[in-house]
Image (spheres, grey):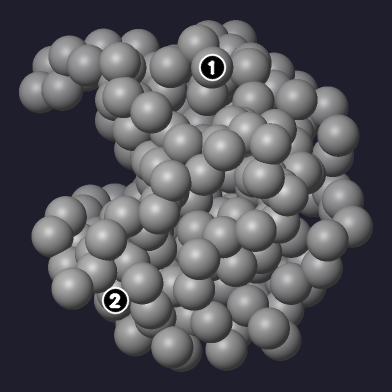
Amino acid sequence: MKTITWLSPQDAPEWFPPLEQALDDPSGLLAAGGDLSPERLIAAYARGIFPWYSPGQPVLWWSPDPRTVLLPTEFHWSRSLEKSIRNKGFQVNINEDFEAVIDACAAPRPHSPGTWITPEMRAAYVRLHRLGFAHSVEVRREGRLAGGLYGVRLGGMFFGESMFSAERDGSKIALSHLVRMCPHNRIAVIDCQLPSRHLLGLGARPIPRTEFKALLSRLISLEPAGLA
């Protein structure tokens, strides 16, 4: 019988249990506890693990099977999206206002008033951004933030964390811009973590955890890298 592993902040930041120990119920839960130090977060992503928990809970670490990924060559370019990009006057920037993007992602939404982006999580990813590992894509129209996304880059992998839309197609335009940047930046895979109808409609698909681990071993670099 599988049991959850508890981490201590005093444990070496690179130590996590094998992914195969992740629970079946709840699916993908691997460990709890520890902290959100940059060293532990980078070690987690490099192993195919990410934190996700609600206020009042300990840090929970996940490695779902299957894993949802988006290959840039499989992104669905719909006619409506291309029309929005051409005609609606959106401007896209990279890393100009990371904190505004993460705050917008954390804001309450009509069908999901709560958020998993706790103050502790926000501070952790702002630290990763300042260290050169976390990046944001900002979509603006008439100077206002209309959408965006943020995530962590390690070598040829971009681990998407969250995205938002303040206007129609805002998050789609942010993701499409990231997709366009991938070949130049040698990013082969965008990790979407868990499936959603929105992401599946844009071309994301599930793959077995074993396949995801193989991609990590081939694509990961632990050095900070930008987006250009």
Q: Residues within 10 Å of mark 2 (few under 14, many from 20)?
A: some
Q: Earlier in the sequence, mark 1 or mark 2?
A: 2
Q: Residue at x 84, y 39 (%)?
A: 132
Vertically, is 115 above or below 86?
above
Vertically, is 96 above or below 129?
above
- Along the horizontal axis of the image, is 111 left or right of 43? left
Q: Which element is circle 1 on?
A: helix
Q: Give coordinates of residue 53: x percent, y percent.
A: 34, 33
Front residue (pair 132, 82): 132
Q: Residue at x 32, y 67 (%)?
A: 22
Q: Which mark is residue 169?
A: none
Q: Give coordinates of residue 5: x percent, y percent.
A: 40, 54
Is residue 214 visible in this depiction of the protein?
yes
Is residue 92 visible in this depiction of the protein?
no
Q: Which element is circle 2 on?
A: loop
- Along the horizontal axis of the image, is 25 left or right of 73? left
Q: Residues within 10 Å of mark 1 (few under 14, many from 20)?
A: few
Residues at discs 1 and 2 in contact (Cβ within 8 Å): no
* Residue on which disc 1 sits: 120
Q: Amino acid at mark 2?
A: Pro
* Residue on which disc 2 sits: 66
For marks 1 and 2, give the CA distance: 28 Å
- Residue 94 quadrant: top right
Q: Amino acid at mark 1?
A: Glu
Q: Give coordinates of residue 124: x percent, y percent.
A: 64, 26
Q: Give coordinates of residue 221: x percent, y percent.
A: 82, 68
Q: Residue at x 50, y 66 (%)?
A: 17
- Residue 101 quadrant: top right
Q: Residue at x 87, y 51 (%)?
A: 224
